[in-house]
Image (tube, rainbow, N blue to C red):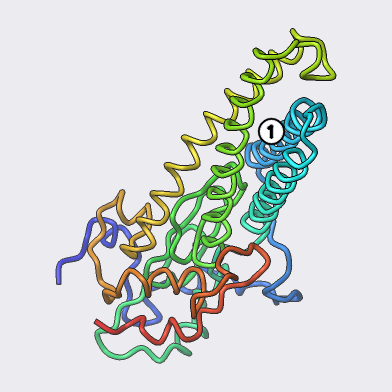
Amino acid sequence: MKSSPANRSRDIERQAGYLRPEHCTPPPPRSHSPHDMWFIRDGCGIVCGVITWMLVFYAEFVVVFVMLLPAKSVVYSIFNGAVFNGLAFLALASHFRAMCTDPGAVPKGNATKEFIESLQLKPGQVVYKCPKCCSIKPDRAHHCSVCKRCIKKMDHHCPWVNNCVGENNQKYFVLFTMYIALISLHALMMVALHFVFCFEEDWTKCSSFSPPATVILLILLCFEGLLFLIFTSVMFGTQVHSICNDETGIEQLKKEERRWAKRSKWMNMKVVFGHPFSLSWLSPFARPDHGKANLYQYVV
């Protein structure tokens, strides 16, 4: 089997000595649970994350105070308010889970002599060592220069969630893009209806704000909604496509040779969102259960 250029640049080893484990200090003892909060201290990512929340809150303000509260129909206001606020809550919850969930970081500095010998490698078996974080790199793991860790099944590093999108948090990232696209579409529909209502009625009666302020707020919301609808829809589509084909964004970009077993598209979805299919797929609060889905991982 030919090795790809990406594989040739790695440290390849069949014996512990070749990996130079003396260059790796033992990893610090883990004093916390793997379910503890994960947070990347990156200035750009933190700013992008805060901007994301502020834009959602801005949309919330315009929808509630400019369009829904002045509306004549109470049923219209309650229904649209419940739908928009519910989707916005799920979007922010998905963003928080994507940002504060360990994406699948490989233990740092585990390329020690003791750990390599404990693997009990067979003759001819190949393992990879990341020279940057001094870790034994599992298959399909890549090093992130922002997180400074190797991430299992890393798709990409997204500054908007201030985290890598990887094996453990891809579900939350997909839900985040889906719910942002839905609230953007909902907001655009309400803006269009509100403009029609204001043109038919007196502008001073269609909002508690002055006509110029109302127009500016609605135009800004329209621009924000259109921009986020296009961006998140495209991102949602590419993520679902990658999941169905079981190929991450980095693997597609580097055109890495496929060395893992092929599964059905439906099974690939279950691996990310949980097995079996249920409404918990749509919940950012439900941790996906990969147990049964992984039984099919190496079935061709």
Residue at 35% in and 76% down: 127
* Residue 237 versus residue 283 in the image, above or below: above
- Which amino acid type is shown beneath numbered disc 1? Leu
Q: Where 114 sits versus 249, above or below?
A: below
Residue 226 place in picture, x, y as percent: 53, 29
Which quarter of the picture shows residue 205?
A: top right
Residue 71 in the image, given as x and y percentages of width and height: 77, 29
Q: Is residue 174 visible?
A: yes
Q: Identify the residue at horizontal 69%, vertical 44% (top origin).
A: 84
Q: Is residue 105 visible?
A: no
> Nearest the camera: 191 or 108?
191
Q: Is residue 236 above or below residue 18?
A: above
Q: Is residue 41 left or right of residue 260?
A: right
**Residue located farthest toward the top when viewing the structure as drawn:** 212
Q: Secondary structure at mark 1?
A: helix
> Which residue is the site of mark 1?
55
Question: Measured from the top left, where is residue 171 in percent x and y?
Answer: 53, 62
Where residue 115 sits: x, y (%)? 51, 83
Which residue appears at 76% of the width and 42% of the height?
A: 75
